Amino acid sequence: MNATTQNRTRAICGWRVGLWLALAFIVALMAEPVNAASRSIQSVTRQFFASATAEGMPRASAPIPASTNLISLDPGSLAILAERVKESLLRELGAQDRWSGKIFFILHPATPGTTPVFVQNIRFTDAWQYQVDLHDRLDADQLTRAVVQALLQEMANRQAGPRAAELPVWLVEGLTAQVLMGGGPTLVPQPRTRQTYESIAPDAFQTARSVLMKQSPYSFSDLSLPSTQQVSGEGWPVYQASAQVFVAQLLALPEGRAQLREFIARLPRYWNSQLAFIESHRTQFGTMLDVEKWWSLATLNFGNRDRFAKWSHDASLARLDEILQLPMEVQPVATAPAELARLRLQEVLEKAEYPAQKALLQRAASQIQLLQLNSPPDLARLMNDYRVTILGYLRQRDSAGIEGPRGQLAPSSVAAVNEARKQLDVLDVILGDFRKYAPASAKIVAPGAVNTPVPAP
């Protein structure tokens, strides 16, 4: 090859190399927005990856209409929020962060007719991964529920084979409510709102109380296998309230957290989540009937207590009436056999011998003291007055002696009885006023048929 041919060959090669470099530069410029839009942001624990589609990127800073309560999401804020939700969920379950599956969040423009949240499991040869498609504008409940569902799915699938665990709806809804309650107002900051912190936290069960006052909660069977009507329309708020209270009551059991973690781990082994529940809670419940009985009592106890776990006014007054009516055997006619009756305190002072009085009154005073600790504060003074009156009467009778001459009561004992009766009469009048003028409170709702409406209070 002569010099001229070599120079021509070098020129052609140089031209081709320059053309390829130019084409590569143009392709890189064209592809850069897509790569930038699809670039993931990894969270601090490296479990979460958040990204946004190319269409969603320009909307990150777009204003949200003032009439809505939506949160504008971008990959960075989403990664932070996911970590907060995970921390709150682990705290509720008493679990450590031992994740094995990665969770990928992809933000899409919130367009009409599209699903706000879609969670899917992706099975690889040796592990599960999860993709959560989200609207780039969601409210706090939707966002928290999506993260909780993905986290629970990851927990359940850690020991799963090719079949992913099927999460019961009550588990996701109940734990979402617990996470929102435990995380506090800073878990998912609301837009256009001022954060105010109070020494007394708001009642996290206020909505559930108002719903379950009007309709009986769903049974455990219905929570596990709900009908279409129960998870849509007017039935959905009842389902959410039932799930929130059910999970809260489970976590309050002595081994509640450990048992719920075991339940989540057992889900991949069973097609029916109820079987996994019975197996994980075998020390607490033997059969499904045991679960339903416990749940009925738990809902009754929940309905009779307020936000501070105190008995409601109605329940407290009903219990006080029961305590003030002492069980005692009476003989209506001299020739008739004795019958068990319930007598007011004033009647007991008149008809019973002092040794029998003393045992009954001491028991009543102890029961009133226990009720006082579990009653609303405005009833505590009245209950304390009843207890002080009873104990004061017992002290006077003990110091005065039992009988006077010819089997009659000693004058000091008569004075003690009369004084106690007067004080009890006054307290009974005050008790009657509390029944008339006490503020409206939750009515006592006895466990009834599943999904049977209860008259509104």
Image (cartoon, helix red, strand yellow):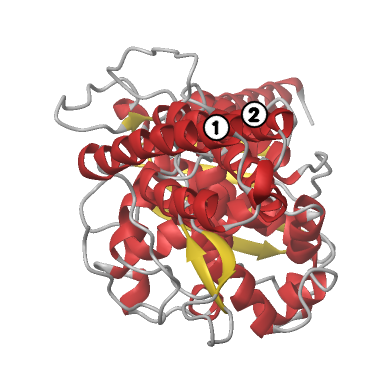
Rendered residue at 35%/79% (across/down): 228
Q: What residue type is labelled 1?
A: Ala
Of the 4 image quadrants, the one containing the N terminus is top right
Left or right: 338 as drawn, with respect to 376: right
Estimate the spatial distance between the alpha carbons at disc 1 and disc 2, rounded to whole Å.
6 Å
Circles 1 and 2 in contact, beta carbons < 8 Å: yes
Query: What amino acid is found at the position of numbered circle 2 in the picture?
Result: Gln
Between 30 and 455, the residue placed more toward the observer is 455
Q: Position of residue 376 (x, y in %)?
A: 44, 34
Q: What element carries label 1?
A: helix
Q: Name the residue under label 2.
A: 396
Q: Which of 163 and 428 is in front in this view?
A: 428
**Crowd around label 2: few <14 · some 14–19 · many ≥20 (10 Å):** some
Q: Relative to residue 350, is residue 449 depicted above or below?
A: below
Residue 126 rendering spot, x and y as whole percentages: 85, 63
Q: Is mark 2 on a helix, strand or loop?
A: helix
Q: Which mark is residue 416?
A: 1
Q: What number of labels is visible?
A: 2
The image quadrant that residue 5 belongs to is top right
Mark nearer the N terminus (1 vs 2): 2
Residue 424 appears in the figure: yes
Image height of 3 relative to 419, above or below: above
Picture quadrant of residue 352: bottom right
Q: Decide which of 289, 47 is in the foreground and name it.
A: 289
Residue ID at (51%, 31%)? 415
**Residue at 71% in and 36% down:** 91
As drawn, the residue found furthest toward the front would be 406
Q: In this view, does 241 lie above or below 346?
A: below
Indicate the position of residue 67 as horizontal and vertical percent values.
14, 30
Q: Where is residue 438 in the image (x, y as percent from the top left)?
A: 27, 38
- What is the quadrant of the C terminus in the image? bottom left
